[in-house]
Every structure is written in C-alpha cells, then in structure tokens.
Image: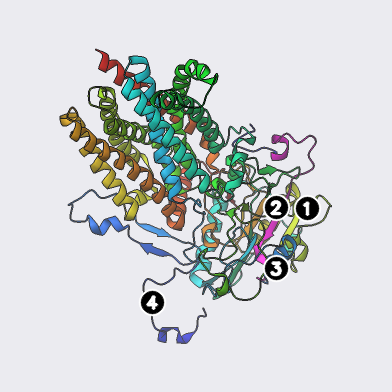
Amino acid sequence: MGQLTGPTDPAADARWHDPGPRKGFFTDTSICIGCKACEVACKEWNRNPRDGDLELLGSSYDNTGALGASTWRHVAFIEQDRDRIEEARVSGRALVSLGMPGLGAPAPADPAAVSTAPPDTPEFRWLMSSDVCKHCTHAGCLDVCPTGALFRTEFGTVVVQADVCNGCGTCVAACPFGVIERRTDGTAAPGTKPGERKGEQPAVPNIGVAQKCTLCYDRMVEDQTPACAKTCPTTSIKFGDRDELVAQAEERVAELHAQGMTEARLYGANDLDGVGGTGSIFLLLDEPEVYGLPPDPRVPTADLSRMFNRAGLAAAGMMAAAVFSFLKGRS
Amino acid sequence: MTTSDYDSLRPPDAAGGRRRGGRRTRRAAPGRIAGADGSREMPMVPEAEFTSYYGRPVVKPAPWGPEIAAYLFLGGVAAGSGLLAAGAQLTGRPKLRRNARLSALAAVGLGGAALVKDLGRPERFLNMLRTVKLTSPMSIGSWILSAFSAGAGVAAAAEVDRMTGERLPLGPLRRVLQVAEGPAGLAAALFAPPLAAYTAVLLADTATPTWNASREDLPFVFVSSASLAAAGLAMITTPVAEAGPARTLALLGVTGDLIATEVMHRRMDPVAAEPLHHGTAGRMLRGSEALAIAGGLGTLLGGRRRGVAALSGLALMTASALTRFGVLEAGIHSARDPRYTIEPQKRRLAARRGAGLTNDSITTA
C-alpha cells in the first residue's frame, strides 16, 4: 500500500523500478479556440463510440456535455459578460494576495517591454477549456478498484485494463472530478431503442466496464505524443514531463498577470492539495466551478484509515451488543 | 449571448430555466419554506449561492441500482443473524441457532446474488478475488463476505442435514461437517461485525458528497441497522422462549440506530446532509425512524407475545431496509446536483484560508 495523501512520485510509490519522468498535460485555456479537434482526435485514436444521440444541449457551443466513458476530452464553452470578467479578475488577484505557492515563478524577461497597465475589460468573452482526466497523484478511482483493473503506469498515469474490470462502479463514485464512468451501450439514455439512434454506428466495445482517458498509454510506450496534444492547433494542450509543464504554467500565469489579466490561475499544480497534485494541469481564467471543476477536491481515500478505525469501533460495538444480549438472557 | 443597447428590450429569462454557466445562482434551501413557521425542525443551511457549469454535476453518481441497497440490507441481516446463531450455539438455544443460521445463509446468498447482478460484467465477479487491496473497501468487503459465507454456509448445511434427518448425500463428509459446524458458526460470527460495518466505508470512501460527509458516523448507523434487522428476523422466525437475546439485541439496535442517525445528521456539513432530509430519501429515512421506534416499543412492551413479536420484527426489518435504500438514494441524489459538491467544498476552502492555511488549494496563482 502506497502513500494515501501528500506530495509523492506516484510511479515510484506504485513500486515501478526506475520510473521515467512523470508525464502529464498542461492545458492552457487562455489560448484554446474551442475547435474540439482534441475531442475528435481522442475519439478517433481510442475508437470511442458516440455518446448520446447528437442532441443540441443549448449550452453555448458545447453539445458534448461532460467527460464520460466514451468522451475522454471535453471542451467547455462559457459565455461571460463584463461583470463576470471583473469578478474573475478580482478572485484571481485574491489568490495572489493570499501568498499562494507558485509566486516564485520567474518574471518576464524584460519588464520594461511589457505594459503593466490592466487591459480594457472586454464587454464579453468566451471561456473555452478542454477538460480531461486529471491523472491524480492520489487517484481515488485507482485506490478503490477492487480487481486491480486500474493501475499506475510507469509514466505516473492511471489506466484501466478493460479485460480485468468487472464493472463494479466503485471508481465512478470515487473520482472527485467525475471523470471515469461505466460504459453503457453508448447512448445517453440506456433505454433508447436501437432503431431510434441516428445513423449507422459500429459495435460498441467494452460495454459495462469503466473507461477513461489513458493519456494515450499505447502511444506513450512508443514515444508518441497523445492524440489530443498532437492535434491541438494552438498548442493549448501541451504534453510533456510534469515538472517542466508546471514550470511552464507558472511562467505563463506570471506573464498573464503582468499583462493585467489577473483572472489567470493554475489548477492542479499544487502538490499539497487534496489529491497531491494532478498530472493534467490547467490554466483557468475563472473559478474552477465555472468550468465544472470541483473547487476543493479531496481524494476520499485520504481519510481511509480514519474511516476504517470508525468502522472497527462500530463493529466492536456490534459484537459487544450481541455478547451483552446473550449474557443478559442467562442471568 | 451578446450585450448591446437593445438588451433592455429582451424578454426576461424564463424562470426555472437552465442554469447558465458562469452565472450566479441563488437558491434558498427547500427546508426554509416548509418549516419556516417553526412547526418542524429546520436545517440551518447558509444562503445558497454557487456557480456551476450549466447546472451539470461535478462528480458522477455511482452506477448502483436498488440491488446495492438490497445488498446493504441483506448483508446486515446476514451479519446480525450470524452473531445470533453463534450466541445461540454457545448458550444452547437450538431453535434460535437453526433459524439464525438458515437466515444468515439465505440473506448472504441473496445479497451476493444482488451484488453480482449489479456488476457491469457479472460473469467476471470472481475478479474481485484476484487481489487483496487494502485501499479498496470493496476488495476488503469481498474477502469479508467470502469468509463469512464460508462459515455461515457450513453451519447452515449442518442444520439442513439435521432437519432432513441426515439425508443429504454427504457420505463420509458428514463426519467432517459435524466437526466443522461449531467452529464454522463461530468463524462466521467473527466476520459478522466487519460485514455489517464495511459497507459504510464502501459508501463513505467516495466523492459522493452525502456519503463522504457521513463518514464519521455511518458505520454506527449501519451496524445498528444490521442488529435490529437480524434481531427482527429472529423474532419473526423463533418462538419467544428462545428469542430473548434477539429482543435485547433489537432494543440495543434501535437505540443505537436512533442515536447514531441523530449524531450523524448533526455532525455532517449542513448542505451535504440535506438530501437525507428531502425528497424520496428523506421520506424513507423518516419512515425508517418511525418504524424503528414502533418496532422497538413493540419489542419492549409485547415482545413476549408471539404475534406482537413477529409484527415488531417485521417493522424492524422494514426500518432497516428503508435506512439502506434512503442512504443510497440520498447519495446518488447528492452526486447529481452540483450544489452538494461545490458549496461544501467552497466553504471548507474558505474556512481553511480564513484560518491561515493558504498553501493547500488546488487553485494557485
């Protein structure tokens, strides 16, 4: 049993001998254009079936909805007015004044060349963010999996072995980010009749087992970049060694702050957070919950020993109650 | 959405429409209106204000249907019955021993079947036993369940053999069964309390807000519920002369259940506790409380009369089943509404920041 909480190297913790550097994503949402090429590339490479019935969801340009068993990249669209932009700028600035870690990032090379005057607040903006599995340092899904179907790779990522998973669904509830899901037949409503589905579709693989982003494990073992990062036309999705990505992300936040865009902040780059830092880190332009991300996620297994202690106490109480019941009958 | 000079001419947004991303949603807790006249207990829930992504859930609900709630109930009945059977075995109560052993096997068999049925790939259920994983409550639970079932199975087989006048085709194994019966019954009793308690950890060790927030006290609720349910079943199946310990256990179970549930509600985050009070889950849990009290009073006042004992037993079993279905439903409901995830998390983050802990946030500048 490895470490359940706090900063650690997850691959070494999973007893990989001589693991390489931990790999991850850095998704810089400030340069995302919402093209969804990552969603398409992910589906194509991983042969993921269609999710749902191609309905329009009425939520801006997002008709994908959420991450799920067959959607391993999801581009969020959020429309904001001037007030919300101002609020985001204030909440981002508040993070700085709290003296949060990450402030040690290097200042821009030539401060004189960059204007530090806050830019005009636009009247309107679109937030676009490509969400993905976080590949947590302490992954709830992996911890609670009873079959060993989920495992930690030598790259520090978390992958499901579809041929081992028996579909118990514990991992689904254990993920603080709502990423992993048990695959149904690929339609949003399990009751949909086959004839009602639009268009011809190939057979759905891995029905009934948990599925999520593998960080393209099959590509990584061949030294290839994951499909989404490879296809991203604006380099909003970056792939690489996590250490380097964190440094790069901190630099980028400092750069944006210097330009007056104090709404910029990092998500997942802090190893002291509730999941020990995430393999996939994000640069966000508003509070995490605006993007559908939890504001203070905590891996449930962090409290596991406490829970087992309480359960042990309760079990002892039950035994004592039974013993008492029979002793009382005797007297 | 655009902003222009003509915006003032737009019709207002339809009330109750879809929550828009990036927009504040203000919503009073449902309990405020219902209990505002002071006629009933009102949860002191802070003013609800949170942002979400189009009102979509942040965490995913466990894909668990009523089979899992049934398993929680049946596992509890099996555990309590295992304890009663062992007690009866040690104190010379043959009828209670026989009935409790058979109850334990039947409950654990049905519960196991419900568990397997709810898997995404039921044919792979044995994969649970391909590893022992201490971080996985379900893995530990599978082993506890297996160990308990083995003990309860042997003990019950011996009873069946005796009931059929030694007609089971056992051959030389009959001797082995007769020797193993006693130790097997005690082994089942050893694994019984863990069997009743681990399911609470199984639920609590998730990101499902209501279950996770109840982690301190849910095990106590579950073992109490298991005790009163198994005692109730024994009061139904066993003549009053031998059911004395079952009656005591039922009363202890009811007391424990009422106290633990109350303590749990008080200690939980008020927002995360809300699903336990409202909707279907709230109705089930209130019904459970009422039936537990009724069953307990029936046991206390008329437990020595066969009819009253059986009725009380039925009330207790129903109470336990309602507890399990209610807790399961409350958790699933809490995962489906982003409010239950976001609000408690924002509050605890703000509390830590207020206390000067500013280095453990997932969001950094």
Name the quadrant of the N terminus of chain A: top right
- Where residue A273 appears, as percent x and y from the top left, is 58, 44
The reply to whether discs 1 and 2 touch (Cβ–Cβ < 8 Å) is: yes
Name the residue carrying label 2: A214
Question: Callout 4, which amino acid?
Answer: Ala
Q: Is residue A13 magenta?
A: yes
Name which residue lies at 20% across and 50% down.
B40
- Under tag 2, what secondary structure? loop
Name the residue carrying label 1: A218
Nearer the N terminus, badge 2 or badge 3?
Answer: 3
Question: Callout 2, which amino acid?
Answer: Thr
The chain letter for the residue carrying disc 2 is A
Name the residue carrying label 4: B14
Name which residue lies at 73% across and 34% down.
A15
- Where residue B315 appears, as percent x and y from the top left, is 25, 40
Q: Specify whether disc 1 shares its chain with disc 4.
A: no
From the viewer's perspective, is A313 left or right of A32? Answer: left
Nearer the N terminus, badge 1 or badge 3?
Answer: 3
